[in-house]
Protein backbone atom coordinates (compact mmCIF):
# COMPACT_ATOMS: atom_id res chain seq x y z
CA UNK A 1 0.00 0.00 0.00
CA UNK A 2 1.46 3.38 -1.04
CA UNK A 3 0.25 6.30 1.06
CA UNK A 4 0.32 10.08 0.71
CA UNK A 5 0.31 11.89 4.03
CA UNK A 6 -1.36 15.20 3.35
CA UNK A 7 -1.96 18.33 5.39
CA UNK A 8 -0.88 21.91 6.00
CA UNK A 9 2.48 22.79 7.58
CA UNK A 10 2.41 22.05 11.31
CA UNK A 11 -0.30 19.35 11.02
CA UNK A 12 2.08 16.65 12.24
CA UNK A 13 2.86 14.87 8.95
CA UNK A 14 6.45 14.07 9.96
CA UNK A 15 5.46 12.73 13.37
CA UNK A 16 2.72 10.53 11.94
CA UNK A 17 5.01 9.35 9.13
CA UNK A 18 7.51 8.04 11.69
CA UNK A 19 4.66 6.30 13.47
CA UNK A 20 3.64 4.61 10.20
CA UNK A 21 7.21 3.61 9.34
CA UNK A 22 7.67 1.88 12.67
CA UNK A 23 4.27 0.22 12.91
CA UNK A 24 3.44 -0.71 9.33
CA UNK A 25 6.89 -1.35 7.87
CA UNK A 26 6.64 1.51 5.40
CA UNK A 27 9.39 3.49 3.71
CA UNK A 28 9.22 7.30 3.98
CA UNK A 29 9.92 9.20 0.80
CA UNK A 30 10.48 12.92 1.27
CA UNK A 31 12.05 15.10 -1.39
CA UNK A 32 14.38 16.69 1.18
CA UNK A 33 15.83 13.27 2.06
CA UNK A 34 16.11 12.33 -1.64
CA UNK A 35 18.14 15.46 -2.34
CA UNK A 36 20.36 14.99 0.72
CA UNK A 37 21.02 11.32 -0.17
CA UNK A 38 21.85 12.18 -3.76
CA UNK A 39 24.26 14.92 -2.65
CA UNK A 40 26.08 12.38 -0.45
CA UNK A 41 26.42 10.01 -3.43
CA UNK A 42 28.79 12.38 -5.29
CA UNK A 43 27.12 11.43 -8.61
CA UNK A 44 27.04 13.65 -11.70
CA UNK A 45 23.49 14.62 -10.73
CA UNK A 46 24.74 15.47 -7.24
CA UNK A 47 27.15 18.09 -8.58
CA UNK A 48 24.37 19.54 -10.76
CA UNK A 49 22.09 19.80 -7.71
CA UNK A 50 24.91 21.30 -5.67
CA UNK A 51 25.60 24.07 -8.15
CA UNK A 52 21.86 24.88 -8.40
CA UNK A 53 21.56 25.11 -4.63
CA UNK A 54 24.73 27.18 -4.32
CA UNK A 55 23.30 29.58 -6.88
CA UNK A 56 20.17 29.82 -4.71
CA UNK A 57 18.04 28.25 -7.45
CA UNK A 58 15.21 25.76 -7.02
CA UNK A 59 15.89 22.19 -8.02
CA UNK A 60 13.75 21.51 -11.09
CA UNK A 61 10.76 19.16 -11.19
CA UNK A 62 12.69 17.05 -13.73
CA UNK A 63 15.46 16.37 -11.25
CA UNK A 64 12.99 15.64 -8.43
CA UNK A 65 11.06 13.28 -10.73
CA UNK A 66 14.28 11.45 -11.64
CA UNK A 67 15.11 10.95 -7.98
CA UNK A 68 11.58 9.75 -7.22
CA UNK A 69 11.62 7.35 -10.14
CA UNK A 70 14.85 5.81 -8.83
CA UNK A 71 13.02 4.95 -5.60
CA UNK A 72 9.90 3.70 -7.40
CA UNK A 73 12.03 1.30 -9.41
CA UNK A 74 13.52 -0.13 -6.19
CA UNK A 75 11.60 -3.40 -5.70
CA UNK A 76 12.71 -3.69 -2.06
CA UNK A 77 10.34 -0.85 -1.10
CA UNK A 78 7.64 -1.37 -3.76
CA UNK A 79 4.09 -0.79 -2.54
CA UNK A 80 5.11 0.31 0.92
CA UNK A 81 6.03 3.94 0.34
CA UNK A 82 4.71 6.85 2.31
CA UNK A 83 4.99 10.18 0.51
CA UNK A 84 5.58 13.05 2.93
CA UNK A 85 5.59 16.63 1.62
CA UNK A 86 5.13 15.46 -1.97
CA UNK A 87 3.22 16.00 -4.22
CA UNK A 88 2.89 19.74 -3.57
CA UNK A 89 0.71 20.62 -6.57
CA UNK A 90 -1.65 18.94 -9.05
CA UNK A 91 1.04 18.73 -11.72
CA UNK A 92 3.29 16.73 -9.38
CA UNK A 93 0.36 14.52 -8.32
CA UNK A 94 -0.33 13.62 -11.94
CA UNK A 95 3.34 12.97 -12.68
CA UNK A 96 3.58 10.80 -9.59
CA UNK A 97 0.61 8.73 -10.78
CA UNK A 98 2.14 8.11 -14.18
CA UNK A 99 5.53 7.24 -12.67
CA UNK A 100 3.85 4.83 -10.27
CA UNK A 101 1.87 3.12 -13.01
CA UNK A 102 5.10 2.62 -14.97
CA UNK A 103 6.18 0.36 -12.08
CA UNK A 104 2.70 -1.22 -11.69
CA UNK A 105 2.02 0.70 -8.51
CA UNK A 106 -0.49 3.29 -7.37
CA UNK A 107 -1.49 5.45 -4.40
CA UNK A 108 -4.11 3.56 -2.41
CA UNK A 109 -4.61 6.00 0.45
CA UNK A 110 -4.37 9.73 1.08
CA UNK A 111 -4.43 10.60 4.77
CA UNK A 112 -5.84 14.11 5.05
CA UNK A 113 -4.68 15.61 8.35
CA UNK A 114 -7.18 18.32 9.26
CA UNK A 115 -6.30 21.11 11.70
CA UNK A 116 -7.80 24.57 12.17
CA UNK A 117 -5.43 27.23 10.88
CA UNK A 118 -5.67 29.18 14.15
CA UNK A 119 -4.26 26.12 15.95
CA UNK A 120 -1.53 25.64 13.32
CA UNK A 121 -0.47 29.25 13.68
CA UNK A 122 -0.11 28.79 17.45
CA UNK A 123 1.66 25.43 17.03
CA UNK A 124 4.30 26.98 14.80
CA UNK A 125 4.59 30.56 16.07
CA UNK A 126 4.62 29.38 19.72
CA UNK A 127 7.64 27.08 19.30
CA UNK A 128 10.58 27.87 21.57
CA UNK A 129 13.55 25.78 22.67
CA UNK A 130 15.98 25.82 25.58
CA UNK A 131 19.40 27.17 24.57
CA UNK A 132 21.15 24.60 26.80
CA UNK A 133 19.38 21.20 26.52
CA UNK A 134 17.46 22.04 23.30
CA UNK A 135 14.16 20.81 24.77
CA UNK A 136 11.24 22.29 22.84
CA UNK A 137 8.16 23.94 24.31
CA UNK A 138 5.14 25.78 22.98
CA UNK A 139 4.14 29.10 24.48
CA UNK A 140 0.45 28.27 23.99
CA UNK A 141 0.15 24.50 24.50
CA UNK A 142 3.24 23.45 26.47
CA UNK A 143 4.51 26.50 28.39
CA UNK A 144 8.29 26.67 28.94
CA UNK A 145 8.44 25.86 32.67
CA UNK A 146 12.02 25.42 33.92
CA UNK A 147 13.93 22.45 32.45
CA UNK A 148 14.57 19.41 34.67
CA UNK A 149 18.29 19.76 34.07
CA UNK A 150 19.98 22.08 36.62
CA UNK A 151 22.51 23.11 33.93
CA UNK A 152 19.62 24.94 32.25
CA UNK A 153 19.27 27.53 35.04
CA UNK A 154 20.77 30.23 32.83
CA UNK A 155 18.92 29.13 29.71
CA UNK A 156 17.61 31.45 27.02
CA UNK A 157 14.48 30.48 25.10
CA UNK A 158 15.23 30.46 21.38
CA UNK A 159 12.77 30.88 18.57
CA UNK A 160 13.52 30.06 14.92
CA UNK A 161 13.34 33.21 12.83
CA UNK A 162 10.80 31.71 10.41
CA UNK A 163 8.49 30.54 13.20
CA UNK A 164 6.47 33.75 13.29
CA UNK A 165 2.85 34.58 12.49
CA UNK A 166 3.65 36.35 9.18
CA UNK A 167 5.73 33.48 7.79
CA UNK A 168 3.14 30.92 8.90
CA UNK A 169 0.33 32.83 7.16
CA UNK A 170 2.40 33.00 3.99
CA UNK A 171 3.05 29.23 4.09
CA UNK A 172 -0.65 28.54 4.69
CA UNK A 173 -1.60 30.79 1.78
CA UNK A 174 0.76 28.91 -0.56
CA UNK A 175 -0.67 25.64 0.76
CA UNK A 176 -4.25 26.83 0.06
CA UNK A 177 -3.42 27.97 -3.45
CA UNK A 178 -1.10 25.24 -4.73
CA UNK A 179 -1.35 22.17 -2.54
CA UNK A 180 -4.96 22.01 -1.34
CA UNK A 181 -6.39 21.52 -4.88
CA UNK A 182 -4.65 18.11 -4.95
CA UNK A 183 -7.29 16.92 -2.51
CA UNK A 184 -9.97 17.30 -5.20
CA UNK A 185 -7.84 15.28 -7.60
CA UNK A 186 -7.44 12.42 -5.12
CA UNK A 187 -11.06 12.65 -3.90
CA UNK A 188 -12.27 11.86 -7.41
CA UNK A 189 -10.37 8.56 -7.05
CA UNK A 190 -12.10 7.86 -3.72
CA UNK A 191 -8.89 7.34 -1.80
CA UNK A 192 -8.99 10.26 0.66
CA UNK A 193 -9.58 9.58 4.36
CA UNK A 194 -9.94 12.50 6.77
CA UNK A 195 -8.04 12.45 10.04
CA UNK A 196 -8.87 14.79 12.92
CA UNK A 197 -5.36 16.11 13.59
CA UNK A 198 -6.51 18.56 16.30
CA UNK A 199 -6.24 15.72 18.81
CA UNK A 200 -3.04 14.69 20.60
CA UNK A 201 -0.35 12.75 18.72
CA UNK A 202 -1.34 9.38 20.13
CA UNK A 203 -5.03 9.59 19.22
CA UNK A 204 -4.16 10.82 15.72
CA UNK A 205 -1.93 7.74 15.33
CA UNK A 206 -4.82 5.57 16.52
CA UNK A 207 -7.17 7.02 13.91
CA UNK A 208 -4.60 6.41 11.18
CA UNK A 209 -3.95 2.89 12.37
CA UNK A 210 -7.64 1.96 12.24
CA UNK A 211 -8.02 3.48 8.74
CA UNK A 212 -5.16 1.31 7.47
CA UNK A 213 -6.41 -1.82 9.21
CA UNK A 214 -9.89 -1.29 7.68
CA UNK A 215 -8.35 -1.03 4.21
CA UNK A 216 -6.30 -4.19 4.68
CA UNK A 217 -9.38 -6.20 5.68
ZN1 LIG B 1 16.99 23.04 29.10
Image: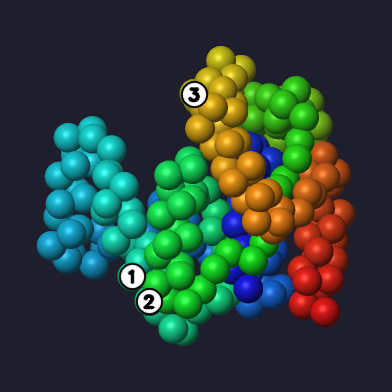
Marks 2,1: beta carbons within 8 A: yes
In percent of width and height, residue 54 lies at: 19, 39
State the CA–CA distance, disc 2 to disc 1. 5 Å
The residue indicated by pointer 3 is 161
Q: Is residue 72 left or right of residue 56?
A: right
Residue 132 image-quadrant placement: top right
In percent of width and height, residue 5 lies at: 63, 54
* Local SS, label 1: helix
For the C terminus, which image quadrant? bottom right
Residue at the image point whose x is 57% and y is 74% from the top? 80
- Nearest the camera: 22 or 150? 22
Q: Is residue 15 left or right of residue 203?
A: left
For the N terminus, which image quadrant? bottom right
Please, is residue 153 above or below residue 64 in the view? Answer: above
In percent of width and height, residue 107 lies at: 58, 64
- Nearest the camera: 121 or 59? 59
In percent of width and height, residue 44 lies at: 13, 62
Residue at the image point whose x is 72% and y is 45% from the top? 113
State the CA–CA distance, disc 3 to disc 2. 39 Å
Residue at the image point whose x is 48% and y is 41% from the top? 89
Q: Residue furthest top?
A: 166
Mark 2 is surrounded, within 10 Å at the Cα level, by few (under 14), some (14 to 19) or many (20 or more) other residues, namely some
State the CA–CA distance, disc 3 to disc 1. 35 Å
Examine the rendering and report whether any part of residue 76 can be seen.
yes
Q: Which mark is residue 73?
A: 2
In primary-sequence order, the first of circles 3 and 1 is 1
Q: Which mark is residue 70?
A: 1
Please, is residue 198 above or below residue 95 in the view? Answer: above
Amino acid sequence: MNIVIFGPPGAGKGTQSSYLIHNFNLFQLSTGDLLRDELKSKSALASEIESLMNAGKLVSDTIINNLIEKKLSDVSIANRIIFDGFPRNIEQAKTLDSLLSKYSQSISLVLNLKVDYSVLTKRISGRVSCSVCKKTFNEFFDPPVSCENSKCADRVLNKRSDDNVETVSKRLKTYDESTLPILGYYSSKNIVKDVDAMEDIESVSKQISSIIKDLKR
